């Protein structure tokens, strides 16, 4: 028996422990070890019952995702290979009790459900998150879960991938008992009690009570399908998961298993799954900073402070309060402070109303926020995040004040979305403590934190920022300091092309619907209206040098702003909006203005196909991304993917712009970019990296591998 799995005894109860850190994944050797342990326990007459438990911080967190590449590349047969282990557990004549702590996810929950009983600690999480990897449960989860928790609950869990708590699991008969005290002794006592009762073990696959009312179950599945349809736009796996649960309602267990395996393989070999597995490992890869020693000390962040209670400042303050960190919030006037606090209270109240937060949790979070008009208590802060107006002079003034008001070891972070971190740091006496923390609106919701290293930013400040991102529930991505950093710099070209396409004949809806059909959460023009067209207008006026002389510039946006059409905030932008509504409505006045600008500029208008819209906007994004990689502003192509998926609504099932580019083929993209350069101008100059990879038939994933990173895990 390998060290991965051990069998010990406690007065007649065999204890099978899995030791495969960090998350007890069912890697090669683990299922085999469990089978051997069950066989040994079966043979041992002194053992009346068995407990299966995970060593370390969690029960089994799933099948080993790293192994999937071997299946899709044909190295391994088309099966996750867990069936023999599940049968060994379920067919064991002695009662097997599964003891759950941490996360029983995917193959982990499927293993638990093959056991005869399940107990868990109150903090345990149980779930089938496979759809987040573009697949469905492939080891009986869609057949056993409905037999325990009912078809509706099973479909909901498998289609959303969201975990449930131990309390919810108990309520839905997924577990038999919550162990309040220490898990192992509690589980052993439970097993001893069951063994004492005697009788044949309870096999999940033989349970039918939950499946008896077929019509009611089918109706419930239809309701789940409808609910999922609204959230899972463009995704394949969530619907396949419901189809598999339906097979449990319609077919005998063994037939249902076959149907599940068929649907599982359909998903696993899909482009969507490869992309989503790339994203899973990518979100872990971005946390690894080449050249930053693993043992770099991090600074404890026990108290924070935020300067500016506007939309961003308020969201950032809530993010700290939500993470349990007390936060001082400073504003320049009582009126602005009160408005900011009001907005946060309303935000929390809305979450309470939706049942996402209890009233008590709301009060606890608000109690962590300490409003102020002075820097008096800023000595207490380990980190300060500046979130004032996007204007260099103002930011420099605030940083000079913070340099005096805070402890010399405090970290000073700027939420600037475009400005030069080094210039800001230069007004302080501790540039090594200055860094960019670029949150995305709404800051308490969006998962991305773009961490901008200045040329003086210390390793400890970088390491602390990366760790803090995780504490705040964010995905932290480290980027270099240039105008717009990574996300906004790439977005500039994407927006530019969207507006050029309008001038050349596409309508506002055509541009946006081409990209939402591609899977992007919101079209570029609707995003402009949401963010406020005046933000870009002010930046263009303050930084005319950003547009190289003689280069073509978009004509309409400035005109819209001169007319006071700033977007949602003024009820008109590229679209018009009814009072208090965020629903985009076509506006003939905007279309008229576009035609007029084009006519005056002598631009011939023509019918533009959705493919061209997608190509010109996304290839502009990808080409700029390649330049950013060349300059080392982004560490890896996957970093860009994670930025766009978590900050700009790029669909995870497309893997991000750079992964998507690899699926199209860089040779084709390079050729198209060169063609656009000839047709539309120098702003399309292809990146040298794109040319190199295109010519050598290699990919951005190869580029990352060259740099020592890889998220494709052998995905071919
Ligand atoms: N397989 C392989 N590696 C895994 C893994 C897994 N299932 N889960 C985590 N890791 C690695 C991860 O890459 C990282 O590595 C390290 O463990 C720590 O993870 C048959 C087909 C459990 C909530 O989808 O959600 O079962 O970067 O940083 O934040 O039906 O990991 O250090 O080298 O995320 O504490 C279903 C995936 C699989 C759960 C812990 N299971 N994991 O979060 O740590 S499909 C999942 C998680 C399946 C069956 C199907 C999280 C976690 P490295 P971490 P964490």
Image (cartoon, rainbow, N blue to C red):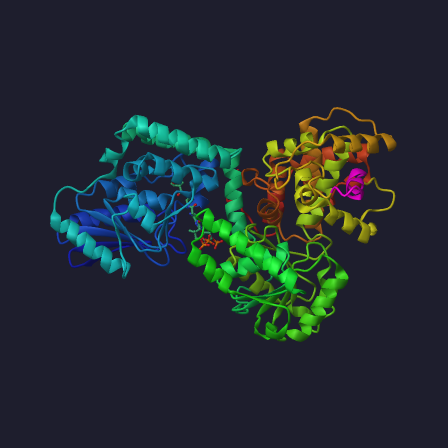
Q: Residue 34, position in %: x, y?
A: 28, 48
Where's residue 27, x and y in %? Answer: 38, 47
Residue 423 location, quadrant: bottom right
- For image coordinates 24% across by 41% down, the residue present is 90
Residue 114, position in %: x, y? 27, 42
In-front residue for pair 456/163: 163
The question of residue 16 being in magenta is answered with no
Along the viewing direction, whichever of 573 and 613 lies nearer the viewer: 573
Asked if one can make out residue 290 in the rendered structure from this viewpoint, the answer is: no
Q: Is residue 340 above or below residue 578?
A: below
Residue 341's quadrant in the figure? bottom right
Image vertical order of residue 407 relative to residue 674, above or below: below
Answer yes or no: is residue 173 visible: yes
Q: Nearer the viewer, residue 569 or 621?
A: 569
The stretch of residues the image draws in magenta is 554-565
- Going by the image, does 666 lie left or right of 98? right
Whether residue 414 sits left or right of residue 302 in the image: it is right
User: Going by the picture, which residue comes out furthest to the top?
Assistant: 607
In which image quadrant can residue 696 be found?
top right
Which residue corresponds to the image point at 70% horizontal and 40% vertical from the top-left?
A: 494
Q: How many numbered marks does the figure carry?
A: 0
Location of residue 39 in the rendering, given as x and y in whole percent from the top left corner = 21, 46
| 582, above or below 225, in the image | below
As for residue 564 lying within the magenta part, the answer is yes
Is 371 left or right of 42, judged from the image as shown? right
């Amino acid at each position: 028996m390998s060290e991965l799995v051990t069998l010990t005894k406690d007065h007649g109860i065999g204890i099978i422990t899995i030791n495969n850190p960090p998350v007890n994944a069912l890697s090669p050797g683990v299922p085999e070890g469990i089978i051997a342990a069950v066989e040994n326990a079966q043979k041992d007459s002194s053992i009346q019952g068995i407990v299966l438990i995970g060593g370390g911080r969690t029960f089994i967190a799933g099948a080993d995702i790293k192994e999937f590449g071997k299946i899709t590349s044909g190295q391994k047969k088309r099966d996750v290979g867990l069936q023999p282990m599940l049968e060994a557990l379920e067919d064991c004549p002695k009662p097997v009790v599964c003891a759950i702590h941490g996360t029983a996810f995917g193959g982990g929950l499927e293993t638990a459900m093959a056991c005869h009983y399940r107990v868990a600690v109150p903090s345990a999480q149980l779930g089938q998150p496979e759809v987040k990897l573009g697949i469905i449960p492939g080891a009986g989860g869609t057949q056993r879960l409905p037999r325990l928790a009912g078809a509706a609950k099973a479909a909901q869990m498998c289609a959303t991938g969201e975990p449930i708590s131990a309390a919810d699991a108990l309520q839905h008969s997924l577990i038999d008992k919550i162990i309040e005290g220490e898990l192992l002794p509690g589980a052993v006592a439970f097993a001893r009690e069951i063994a004492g009762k005697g009788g044949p073990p309870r096999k999940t696959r033989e349970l039918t009570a939950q499946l008896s009312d077929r019509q009611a179950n089918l109706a419930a599945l239809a309701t789940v399908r409808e609910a999922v349809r609204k959230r899972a736009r463009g995704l394949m796996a969530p619907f396949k998961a419901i189809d598999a649960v339906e097979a449990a309602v319609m077919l005998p267990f063994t037939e249902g298993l076959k149907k599940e395996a068929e649907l599982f393989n359909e998903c696993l070999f899909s482009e969507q799954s490869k992309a989503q597995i790339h994203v899973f490992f990518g979100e872990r890869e971005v946390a690894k900073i080449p050249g930053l020693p693993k043992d770099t000390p991090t600074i404890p962040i026990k108290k924070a402070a935020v300067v500016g209670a506007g939309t961003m400042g308020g969201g950032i303050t809530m993010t700290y309060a939500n993470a349990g960190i007390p936060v001082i919030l400073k504003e320049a006037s009582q009126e602005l402070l009160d408005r900011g606090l009001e907005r946060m209270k309303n935000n929390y109240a809305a979450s309470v109303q939706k049942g996402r937060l209890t009233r008590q949790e709301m009060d606890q979070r608000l109690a962590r926020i300490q409003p102020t008009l002075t820097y008096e208590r800023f000595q207490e802060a380990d980190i300060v995040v500046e979130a004032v107006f996007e204007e260099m002079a103002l930011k420099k003034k605030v940083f000079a004040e913070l340099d005096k008001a805070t402890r010399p070891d405090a970290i000073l972070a700027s939420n600037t979305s475009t400005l030069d971190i080094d210039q800001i740091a230069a007004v302080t006496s501790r540039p090594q403590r200055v860094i960019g923390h670029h949150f995305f609106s709404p800051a308490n919701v969006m998962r991305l934190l773009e961490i901008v290293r200045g040329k003086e930013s210390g390793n400890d400040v970088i390491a602390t920022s990366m760790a803090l991102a995780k504490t705040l529930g964010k995905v932290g991505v480290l980027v270099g300091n240039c105008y717009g950093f990574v996300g906004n710099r790439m977005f500039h070209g994407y927006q530019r092309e969207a507006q050029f396409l309008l001038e050349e004949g596409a309508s506002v809806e055509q541009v946006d619907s081409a990209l939402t059909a591609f899977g992007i959460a919101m079209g570029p023009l609707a995003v402009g209206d949401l963010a406020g067209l005046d933000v870009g207008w002010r930046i263009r006026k303050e930084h005319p040098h950003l547009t190289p002389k003689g280069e073509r510039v978009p004509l309409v946006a400035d005109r819209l702003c001169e007319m006071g059409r700033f977007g949602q905030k003024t009820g008109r932008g590229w679209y018009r909006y009814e009072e208090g509504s965020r629903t985009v409505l076509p506006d003939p006045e905007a279309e008229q203005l576009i035609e007029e600008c084009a006519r005056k500029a002598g631009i011939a208008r023509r019918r533009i196909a959705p493919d061209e819209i997608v190509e010109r906007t996304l290839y502009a994004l990808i080409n700029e991304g390649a330049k950013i990689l060349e300059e080392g502003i982004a560490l890896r192509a996957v970093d860009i993917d994670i930025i766009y998926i978590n900050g700009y609504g790029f669909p995870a099932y497309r893997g991000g712009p750079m992964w998507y580019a690899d699926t199209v083929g860089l040779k084709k993209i390079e050729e198209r970019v060169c063609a656009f350069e000839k047709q539309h101008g120098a702003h399309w100059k292809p990146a040298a990296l794109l040319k190199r990879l295109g010519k050598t038939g290699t990919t951005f994933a190869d580029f990352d591998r060259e740099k020592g990173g890889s998220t494709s895990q052998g995905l071919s």
